[in-house]
Image: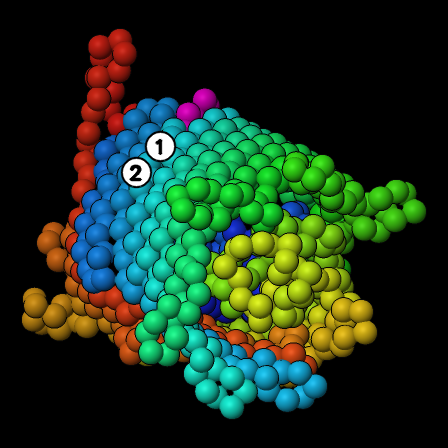
Amino acid sequence: DVMRNIPSVTVDVDGSVQLRNVAPQIFVDGRPTILTLQQIPADDIERVELITNPSAKFDAATTGGIINVVLKKNRKSGFNGIASAGIGSPSILNGNLSLNLRQGKFNLFASGNYNKSGGTGKGETKRENKRNGSVTDYFNQLSETERLRKFSSFRFGTDFFIDNRNTLSFSQNFVNGKFSTNQAQDQQYLTGEKFLYKTGKRLTLSDSRFNKSNSQLNYKHTFPKSGHEFTTDITYNSSSGSNNSQLSNYYFHPDGSEYSNSQFVNNRGNNTNDQLTVQMDYENPITEHSKFEMGLRGYKSSNANVLNSYSVNNGNEFKLPLSTNVKYDETVLAAYSTYADVWKDIKYQVGLRVEKSTFNGLLVDSNRSFGYTLPTNLSHIVDGLFPSLYLTKDIGNEQEIQLNFSRRVRRPSFWQLNPFIDINDPLNISQGNPDLRPEYTNSIEFNYNKQSSNGSFLGVIYFHNNKADITRYSDTISAAQLAQLGNATIEPSAILNTFINAQYTNRIGAEFTLQHKIGNFEVIPNINLQYRTVKANVGKLDLGNEGLNWESKIIFNYKLATASKIFNNTNLQLSAQYQSPRVIPQGRNKPQYQTDFALRKEFLKNNAAAITFSINDVFNTNRYGQVYDTDNYYQDSYNRWNVRSFRLKVTYRFGNRDFTLLNPFGKKSNSRDDDN
């Protein structure tokens, strides 16, 4: 919900965030996180920072840019906090309490959050199966999915101001959640002459749970010269989860009599993930215009995922071949250096990052290894080099132009590599590809920025060249694959969705963002135009595609300022976004659009309290769809994850600057003694 109000950022129906049509890296407080955006309470967010083309200072695995979520950590003197509670429909309930105490050399903070939401989403699939250019049969499917999501989190930490040069900070975050879904699919099977010969009913009950923990220790030393500092961070992330599902399939003749025996499948799985990151950064402003930065980073991740599938017959379970047991370790060692200065009237920053990455995976049951090491040897050292260059010029009248370049890498994710076959949809099954390789991106951007008393304008022209682009590939399942899966309730005409490395994907685009304010009215329109070219082959099959896509977002903010106490300090916000069809290999994504509305009223002394009413997806239009058109099939489908929702939320801020607390020696310590 927060991301929808940010220009350049789009959110699809599954809650996945994209920055200019590419998935970004999510940071929390400047560091990679194990959390997803859905697992970060909005009440804990202070601000969101976008970095569309990161420099060498940042991880090389930031091909899609960076969205950095900065969490609240109040350092006001005394004791203060924020409490909020909200209700809504469908099945929405949330609450948050954040507390902060600044006293002497210590700053203590803690927050707790609970969030529950539900809703029933609908989906539809229409398929034409073909052979030699002629339709052989049709398949239609309607689905309704009732979802219930529950999150809770607890975060606490402290800052210890050792002296005016040294600060030690620690924070701990715990998140747990539960997803449950109840899906019903109604299916129709028709001949090539559109004669209905069979119907199906598929019921899926699933339950997934997770627990995540984030621990961060930070040390900061500041030198006498302003901006001269050294920091060290140690971050440890861990998570565990389980997922269970029951699939029931029933088939009938058109008259309602049984067509064939019912089929049942049970899935039971669990997963663990541990990550350790150690990072050191040094920053030195050598002169008024020049600055030198350098740093080291080590990252280690260990993961395990087990999912067992069983066919159920007369109460007995038989293990299916699609069960999987995967383990993998990932290691990244990095060093970077950047230097910034001014040449004549041009500001520049040049940087280089060096990374060595290793991915070792193991399919335990088959003892099959997979993975990669980059660079493989010194002759391929370029695979581990990631340069960046920024050139900036002030052209007067509060105008600035910038040209920048960077090289990045996108490593395959666990689910893109995992060979487990997801059969929740018998018509569209999915599987990872253990043979995937990382993709490399060369990014060039030209920016024009204009500031004025009424707002700002940002214009961007960009080009992204993605070599070995990780992209989706779909094909009808082969007879051999169907036989290998056994009694897994898979349709013979099912599409197998997986991932491949394309030769390349090129994106050239232009984005324009205006922020304009007139009195109490503010408008922020944003438009992104992009032409995409995909070059990919699977054997002799050409998957190449190209086309223009665009997306637009507009945000209206209005603050009422009247003599009436009822309407004074009232803010209105209306936002709308649209994404045009976008080409993909073998087809296109269908358009998406939605409108959101919010009304916020502040009241009490110093506006300490606020009440907010909001509607997400006002016209209930947001859904995600795809069209595939190949020699073997034509498929038109859409799906919804979220539905229109209504929320009412009350927030109250409180605090006492003169709050005092007995220290361990029994003496009272005034919170204003040391503000550091």
| Pointer 1 with pointer 2, Cβ within 8 A | yes
Image position of 453 (left or right of 488): left
> In the drawing, what numbered circle is on residue 111?
2
Q: Is residue 423 magenta?
A: no
Q: Nearer the viewer, residue 609 or 66?
A: 66
The location of residue 495, given as percent across then percent down, is 59, 68
Q: Residue at x 48, y 38 (%)?
A: 270
Q: Quadrant of residue 368?
A: top right
Q: Quadrant of residue 155?
A: top left
Q: Of marks 1 and 2, which one's residue comes earlier in the chain?
A: 2
SS at badge 2: strand
SS at badge 1: strand
- Amino acid type at circle 2 is Ser
Whether 337 is drawn above or below 47: the answer is: above
Work out which residue is located at the far right of the displayed protein and give it: 379
User: From where the camera sits, is residue 486 visible?
Assistant: yes
Whether 291 is drawn above or below 174: the answer is: below
Instruction: Indicate the quadrant containing the C terminus: top left, top right, bottom left or bottom right.
Output: top left
Please state the extent of the stretch shown in magenta in the rendering: 159-165
In three-dimensional space, the C-alpha distance between marks 1 and 2, rounded to whole angstroms, equals 6 Å
The location of residue 571, given as percent across then percent down, is 23, 68
Q: Residue at x 27, y 12 (%)?
A: 664
